[in-house]
Amino acid sequence: MISTTLACPNCGKRNRVPAAADGAPQCGNCHQPLPWTAEAGDDTFAEVAERSALPVIVDFWADWCGPCRMVTPALEQVSQDMAGRVKLVKVNVDRSPHLSERFTIKHIPTLMMMVRGEVVAQRAGAAPAHELRRWVEDAVKAHA
């Protein structure tokens, strides 16, 4: 399983964050929660997203999609604001045709909220960070 390295938003220390793990990642230096972003595909989605203990924001996107590139910073902001409470999983639709078919992805970006492996909310299109955060919080609250 692939891991990413990111700087802690609190202290700046670089941390390795795995795509899948129990619990939520925290900084090895200051022990603050880290924003958790991972990529998943047809072969890794179950482990990375569906088995996550945290609620998961799934972003179905493509390299060539302008609105997908526009929503990425907003999703990263939500992931950082809600570090330790949600996980952001990015799925490239061009590399994951089975997931696109399974979830009937017709437009991108399409965002899904998953809680305990179940899809609890879905929306298409880009939106600003404050609107996406409200959508995520509402979905998590409704299925806590």
Image (tube, rainbow, N blue to C red):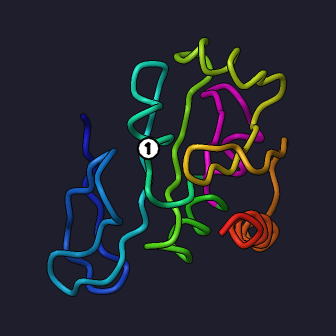
Foreground of the two, 117 or 1: 117
Relative image position of residue 96 (x, y in whole percent): 55, 18
Q: Is residue 99 left or right of residue 50?
A: right
Q: Quadrant of residue 53?
A: bottom left
Assign the N terminus to one quadrant of the image.
top left
As drawn, 52 above or below 139: above
x 72%, y 30%: residue: 65
Foreground of the two, 80 or 65: 80
x 54%, y 65%: residue: 79
As drawn, 142 above or below 37: below
x 25%, y 55%: residue: 5
Relative image position of residue 106 (x, y in whole percent): 83, 22
Magenta residues, start to end: 57-73
Q: Is residue 60 magenta?
A: yes
Q: Residues within 10 Å of mark 1 (few under 14, many from 20)?
A: some
x 15%, y 82%: residue: 29
Residue bearing mark 1: 51
